[in-house]
Image (tube, rainbow, N blue to C red):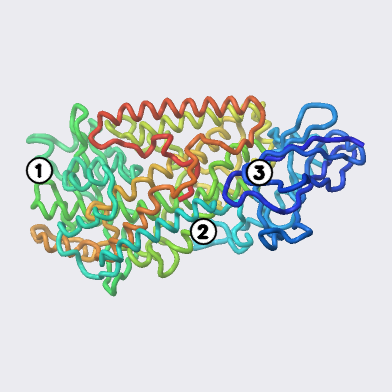
Amino acid sequence: MAEYGVRVSTGEAIGAGTWNRIAVSIVGTLGETPPLPLDHFGKEFSKGAVEDFRVASPQDVGRVLLLRLHKGPLLLPSPVGPLARDAWFCNWLQLTPPQGAPLRFPCYQWMEGSGILTLREGAGKVSWADDHPVLQQQRREELQARQDSYQWKTYRPGWPRCLDEKTVKDLDLNIKYSVTKNVHFYLKAGSGFTEMTLKGLLYRKGLWKSLHEMKRMFNFHKSPAAEYVYEHWQEDAFFASQFLNGLNPVLIRRCRSLPENFPVTDDMVAPVLGPGASLQAELERGSLFLVDHAILSGVRTNVINGKPQFSAAPMTLLYQTPGGGPLLPLAIQLSQTPGPTSPIFLPSDNKWDWLLAKTWVRNSEFSVHEALTHLLQAHLLSEVFTMATLRQLPHCHPLFKLLIPHTRYTLHINTLARELLIAPGQVVERSTGIGLGGFSELIQRCMEELSYTALCLPEDIRARGVEDIPGYYYRDDGLQIWGAVESFVSEIVSIYYPSDASVRDDSELQAWVREIFSEGFLGREDSGVPSSLDTRESLVHYATMVIFNCSAKHYAVSAGQFDSSIWMPNLPPTMQLPPPTSKGQTEPEGFIATLPAVNATCDIIVTLWLLSKEPGDRRPLGTYPEEHFIEEAPRRSIAAFQSRLAQISKDIQKRNKELALPYTYLDPPLIENSVSI
């Protein structure tokens, strides 16, 4: 008979403790013990408790390989009623054998109802490093169970595939919001819609009476950034700056030659460039930039309050003034087809003509951002990364340990989005100009051209030719964070993969990459997205891309939604009149008549307010309270990563003190580890 010490840590979340019976079986090279109860006199496994037990094995099991956790209901009625499904969140177990050092078994999972959970000792192991058939079999069984639970489905044709929530009973507690986060989420949503209802705005279908009346939205909620938007939204320099540091800072690219369908002339831009200046000279100097919303051309539009809505596919030419001066708009064409009915609008035009043209561009920014930059690239692709990680990497795999913090709550928030945002009759269909049909069409179009380059920030910056444009804080801060993540990932990879061959020989890693390619990018080879990885360098780059897009990129294109939209003319979700076909016709009344109805405005603003900030239970980038890595080397790498992020934050905050509008959307302490809202 051998006696073992067992230490058990229960999580601190609401509901983490349990009244259920808990036992362990010890699996070794010579056999397996029967379930050994973990039982003291009185209550065990309370929220936040760390408890010690002694258990006796009736036989020698040899070298310990696994621990099996057994959970079942109490035999007698408990003070709180039937507890057959009383959930328990176990952080970890530590087993101390009769001889030898203690062994740590990370868990960090909910157990709900009666069941058995098999745990591995916490050292990271790739598939080829397992040295015993029992361990190899455990990997296979764990992945098979997860693949049975987390199954794929097609939500809409041409979209990345997603979780089939019907295969996850009641949505597994391991992917659902915590009680704290869930309560905060619904309370915040309810308070926002209630406030708009009490103000008599949420159900008012008519037009806004004036721009002044729209200021009532600032009584809802506001921020310093939102107030800055309100004060400067009509200014050309601020309009242009939003392509760099606003909600959608991923479209602007250097213009080396004017598109044939954008016939801007020297005379048109002379008021900005100066007499005698030429577009050709500025093109050669590299001072012109283009934002092209061509993907919106011909997209289907919505009907709101019984009225047809409208969309445009504008082209915007921008000029970088010399000496690091502001970026300024030079010309806007509201369609992809030039001609008499598609004039080129200029800063020298009538004030209301020019303001309306800029507002059409901002409406296009709303559509492209919400459908593509935010929904597709930040949410749907992050769900693909999450699903593949759960389905193809066992808990003991070092990549699972590296990536799992960056998948927290992603399946839950995306399931909510499919129920409350992008379902028939919900927000996108109720209140956006292109509606659910337009969103779907845009995503299908984008999926046909989405590239690996666009998902990798350094390559994306180079491809768009914006390496040296001044004041591009999304680029500057993003590259700093990308570098910190890449360094961290490189250290982790070097610990577990001694060579390129070790990457090629990791069957689980290759299955993970292959599934992302097939289910997320639908097997499109011309995307440049790899379907296999052959070197340590390619693995580092790929894993960096996953982490960056699931954390920093999502926050950069999500956190500013409310700041940009609370003053609705800066980011109108829809337009109620068609784009102008001539100049000199716009008056203040026509400008307001083009903007969204009151109810559509409120519907969108409350939604974006809800989606712009984490509703409690936050974990900032680099924060890993769940200690999946137990070895000293990866723990040192985590500490170094956190130190690098802290320095990046200090540099950002120092710079922001000098800015009229601080750029905070990539400040590491504000970035969530995962897509969770």
Q: CA distance from mark 3 to mark 2?
A: 28 Å
Q: Nearer the viewer, mark 1 or mark 2?
A: 2
Vertically, is 311 above or below 32? below
Q: Which mark is residue 267?
A: 1
Q: CA distance from mark 3 to mark 1?
A: 72 Å
Q: Which residue is mark 3?
A: 10
Q: Residue at x 54, y 57 (%)?
A: 161
Could you say whether the residue bearing mark 1 is in a helix, strand or loop?
helix
* Residue type at tag 3: Thr
Q: Which mark is residue 543?
A: none
Please state the horizontal and vertical placement of residue 111, each as a whole percent of the image: 68, 52
Which of the marked residues, 3 or 1, is nearer the chain's N terminus?
Answer: 3
Please state the horizontal and vertical placement of residue 295, each as a whole percent of the image: 35, 54
Viewer-proximal residue among 282 and 296: 296
Q: Nearer the viewer, mark 3 or mark 1?
A: 3
Viewer-proximal residue among 107 and 14: 14
Question: Is 476 positioned to the left or the right of 67 in the image?
Answer: left
Classify residue 80 by image quadrant: bottom right
Which of the marked residues, 3 or 2, is nearer the chain's N terminus?
Answer: 3
Q: Which residue is mark 2?
A: 415
